[in-house]
Image (cartoon, rainbow, N blue to C red):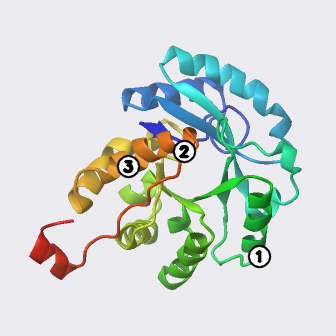
Amino acid sequence: MKDLHSHLLPGLDDGAQSLADTEKMLKTASASGISVIAATSHYSRETDGKYDEAFEKAENLAEKHGIRLLKGTEYDLEYIADVPREKLRPIGATKFLLVDMNRNYIVHAMTNLFFELKLAGFQIIFAHPERMLRADDLDKLINILTENDIYIQMDSGSLVGRYGHLARKNAFRILDRGGCHLLGNDAHNAHHFLFRESRTILNKHYGPGLFELLAEKNPSALLAGEDLIPSPKRKGFWERLLHGRG
């Protein structure tokens, strides 16, 4: 399994605060079957210059636990426009940027920003939209992302209820309508690696195969520079009754 969203680098954001925390996270991730992790610390001007040093230390620990660690950064829409394009840190050796709206309202100006980033050669992964908005606004946001060919990454914690009822309900809303591309743990500590629990939930509600698409096949395709396959739209009640569960 491959997890392209984590906060395990020590002392850079609200994730791991020490190398001991980082190692606990890596140990838990390895035990849960994760073999690749992107260290996507929150961007800030104050800590960005410390990223490479923190990554090198964590990378040595990751190798010890059989994990391949990739560079990356989670960018807030408010800050990414001010970062020189040559200094942006995509995931691994790709051109994929992890972006977080971090608002409870739709930022309509983001479409212009996405267009500018695409012109610069980048592709956007939009992090955990299910945690941000109520149902009607969420539908509008997903439409905007789909129309602009933006990949959607959902948090495992949303599925298992870590972020509350609304985020969990929204997660199923996105999956039912189709269009999710990636599942990430967004882990800030060792207790946040929830792929096993997510697999059980997805298998129960959507049958086998969806978890593997979101946590293995699509992450592998992304790292290989290939297109991602969106999660299929769930069949309605009568379709499932007539043609079998889907």
Q: Residue at x 56, y 22 (%)?
A: 62
Instruction: Give coordinates of residue 239: x percent, y percent.
Output: 18, 77
Amino acid type, residue under disc 2 in the picture: Leu
Amino acid type, residue under disc 1 in the picture: Ala
Q: Residue at x 55, y 77 (%)?
A: 143
Disc 1 packing (10 Å; few <14; some 14–19; many ≥20): few
Residue named by callout 1: 109
Residue named by callout 3: 213
Q: Nearer the viewer, residue 89 or 186?
A: 89
Horizontally, residue 204 falls left or right of residue 160, namely left
Q: Quadrant of residue 5?
A: top right
Instruction: Give coordinates of residue 11: x percent, y percent.
Output: 72, 34
Disc 3 packing (10 Å; few <14; some 14–19; many ≥20): many
Q: Quick check: can you spot residue 122?
A: yes
Mark 1: which secondary structure? loop
Horizontally, residue 213 falls left or right of residue 65, namely left
Nearer to us: label 2 or label 1 = 2
Nearer to us: label 1 or label 3 = 3
The numbered dot on residue 222 is 2
For the image shown, how many numbered marks are present on the structure?
A: 3
Q: Residue at x 84, y 60 (%)?
A: 81
